[in-house]
Image (cartoon, rainbow, N blue to C red):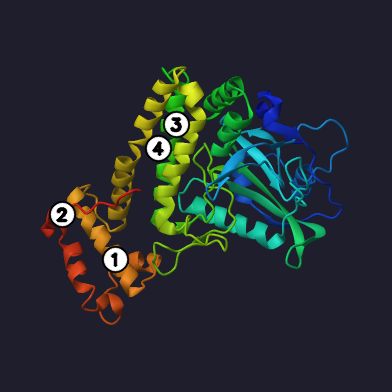
Amino acid sequence: MLNLEYSYLSLPGKFYQLVKPSSFSKPETVLLNEALLEELNIPFTNQQDLISFLLGNEPDGKTSSFAQAYAGHQFGNFTNLGDGRAIVMGEYITSLNQRFDIQLKGSGRTFYSRGGDGKATLKAMLREYLISEAMQHLNIPTSRSLLVAKTGELVQREKEHDGAVLARIMKSHIRIGTFEYARHSGTTEDLRALNDYTINRLYPEIKHEESPALSLLKKVMTDQIDLVVNWMRVGFIHGVMNTDNVSISGETFDYGPCAFMNAYHPDTVYSSIDTTGRYAFGNQPNVIKWNIARLAEALLPVIHPEPSTALQLAQACIDQFDNIWVEKYYEMMLLKLGIEKKAPELYLLVDELLALMLNLKLDYTNTFLALTHDKVTGEGIMAGPEFKPWLDKWKTPSTIPMDMNKQKIG
């Protein structure tokens, strides 16, 4: 038996609903992350015991597992939401005193299912397992996948699919949308309770600062900038950067329509419903800034008791976004080019390379790989006359003039 804690249930009841996951008569493990089980020292001696525990096949009785309530701006439109097919089994504490949510996806209906079946398909859960583990090994903060199991049921989508559940872990499933929910559907005391709980759980080092809520806003903004810079580093397109898909803990999660970009184009999207390009690859920094502004709005009542002062403090924080982004983004891109110097005059080198990659339809990852291994001689587009002037400047970056063509954030 895995001993779990339930500190989230200390919050007011409006933030969750207790619910048991569906029981499945013939669950079958498809993928088991043995390395992660060992890393976290999760004490199961065989996978059948683990799957039985996670799929809720314990005797009926009082349950402490729960679905979380939250809201969110989905493609810019605000709506109340919640875990429609996900249930937090509890919080696992490692031997190093690290706290992780253990959550099941595809485990059945909840109070927030809004008419859905609460189930998941095997192909979607396998995809999340694969991408989340890829992100982990690319050194990008992410949810982790413990296992994927077939449920033995069929799930109806555009056609029938094998049903499955995914067990995943995160430092926390609290998201910007959780704070939006508290602001729009709760009292100031509800918001304060969520703020205090989040800080105590994720960032206890800031709880004694003059305005812990303002410090939380700054911390989340910095962590999200770091996260999205990392996405840009590897050409990752999240696909659906709604505020309910942005974690307060700074982890990538909710791997729906996401992908790693092939041929470079900043307008690349990976969602069939993103017809305006809101969540395009090149727009991700703009979107995360917009999302952080929504967090700032939600936090205003607990940033400062005087509304005008709270607004000024929050705006001053958001106003720092552009400079922080530009510095961190270009530092990362220059390092991709093997340049450790953090000189603004070198930013143009990055911009010119991206323009060439766009015009020549070069693959994002393979271009940097070719530069890394100095494979741009001989035949091929990168050995042609269009690319050579940039290549010469890259090899002698000290000759680049002082022309600060910085990336702008709208």
In the image, 241: left or right of 235? Answer: right
1 or 3: tag closer to the N-terminus: 3
Q: What is the CA distance from the residue labelled 4 to the residue labelled 2?
A: 27 Å
Question: Does 59 sit above or below residue 139?
Answer: above
Q: Are marks 1 and 3 in contact (CB under 8 Å)?
A: no
* Three-letter residue code for mark 3: Leu
The residue that label 4 is drawn on is: 222
* Three-letter residue code for mark 1: Ala
In the rendered image, which quarter is residue 13 located in?
Answer: top right
Q: Residue at x 39, y 70 (%)?
A: 363
Between label 4 and label 1, give the one nearer the viewer.
1
How far across and how far down the image is residue 279, in percent?
48, 55
* Three-letter residue code for mark 4: Thr
Q: What is the CA distance from the residue labelled 1 to the residue labelled 3?
A: 34 Å
Asked which secondary structure carries label 2, the reply is loop
Q: What is the CA distance from the residue labelled 3 to the residue labelled 2?
A: 33 Å
The residue that label 3 is drawn on is: 217
The residue that label 1 is drawn on is: 355
